[in-house]
Amino acid sequence: MDDLLLLDGHNDLPWALRMLDGPEPDLRSAEPRLHTDLPRLRAGGVSAQFWSVYVPGETADPVSAVLEQVDRVYRLVARYGDELALAGGADEVRQVVAGGRIASLMGAEGGHCIANSLGVLRMLRTLGVRYLTLTHNLANDWADSATDVARHGGLTAFGRAVVGEMNRIGMIVDLPHVADTTMRDALAVSARPVLFTHSGARAVTDHPRNVPADVLESLPGNGGVCMATFVPRFVSAAVTGWDDRLAEAMDAAGRDHRDLTVRERFAAGWDGPPAPRARLDDVVAHVEHLREAAGIDHVGIGGDFDGTADLPDGLDDVAGYPRLFDALADRGWSRADLRKLAGENVLRVLRAADVPG
């Protein structure tokens, strides 16, 4: 990993810390309740990280909640200032990494957090948030989600205005979690490259959270990047089938499968079959398909650590990235291609957004 600038697209550590009981742990040492801490980030070769400032779609006051998550990232960087540093753009990422620290960026997950306000969107950008995922698991008032009943047929007129304003102010349009119609509408509207910060390929695993073939094929025309996730139910067909059965059981019990906390609690007490294990090879299959479908300039990595209860064997925490890159090298990936996958592609998208509109 020594010559790779690894910029991961999505890590939910800020929300995981919010949900822990008791005082916040010291991330300078191993924390078994988390996938992420400073020693394991170093062991994994992570150079830069988009920290998710996520709030659930059911949150009553999403603006306050997302601001609290932004504040949490600022406090993390202040507490571990010898290891982390905020980076606002592509050049700052390189400067921070050259100085020996991990570049820290922010992405807001779920368009509900702007509460239908372009003013809130602009203020998040002012605070350093560099992407907005247009939905989470629920549709919002202006965009449809992949895992909810369609309300709009994609983006509404206000949704298209959100995308246009994001282009203008230098905030990247992020498209995991959104419905296929929302993906296509956003790509039609966006004048700047988009990201899928933590998604897979639907041709490999048929799950609505993954990107369909026609959208992947359109990415070169936009300049965007699809960043492969490690979430088992998105990368493994066996886990997807098990999760479908879990969803049926939850529906029968009146529980909402889209609510991550409710889902984890229900699964822990469910008397159904044990969940199958996803493997590193499942992730490799997605990465290779993304390169084949969209091209080497349009693929990246977005593990979603601390945003999922389970992970593939071999990718158990943030120390696991070298295993993935070793597996790809063994399959004939060149160093130049691995550098693009690791971070060069997403830095290009970030630089394109850095330019004033």
Image: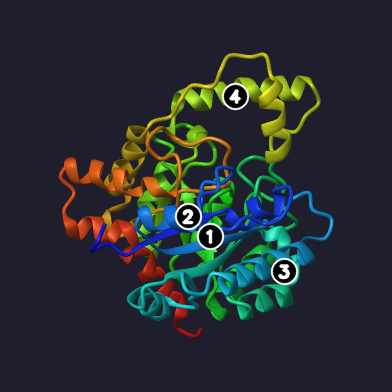
Q: Is residue 9 above or below residue 244?
A: below
Find disc 4 in the rendering and name its residue: 244
N-terminal label among 4 and 3: 3
Q: Nearer the viewer, mark 2 or mark 3?
A: 3
Q: Nearer the viewer, residue 312 or 170?
A: 312
Q: Residue at x 36, y 73 (%)?
A: 100
Q: Position of residue 307 (x, y in %)?
A: 58, 46
Q: Residues within 10 Å of mark 2 (few under 14, many from 20)?
A: many
Whole-angstrom CA distance, mark 1 to mark 4, is: 26 Å
For mark 1, does the 10 Å Cα neighbourhood hold few (<14), some (14 to 19), or many (20 or more) residues? many
Between the residue at mark 1 and the residue at mark 2, the CA separation in whole angstroms equals 5 Å
Which residue, given by chain and number where applicable, does mark 1 sit on? 174
For mark 3, what is the residue? 67
Q: Position of residue 186 (x, y in %)?
A: 54, 60
Label 2 sits on a secondary structure element that is strand
At label 4, the amino acid type is Asp
Q: Give the spatial CA distance, label 4 vs label 3.
A: 34 Å
Q: Element at badge 1?
A: strand
Can you see residue 259? Answer: no
Q: Earlier in the sequence, mark 1 or mark 2?
A: 1
4 and 2 marks in contact (CB < 8 Å): no
- Judging by the rendered image, the residue that carries numbered circle 2 is 196
Disc 3 secondary structure class: helix
Most distant residue in the bottom direction: 356
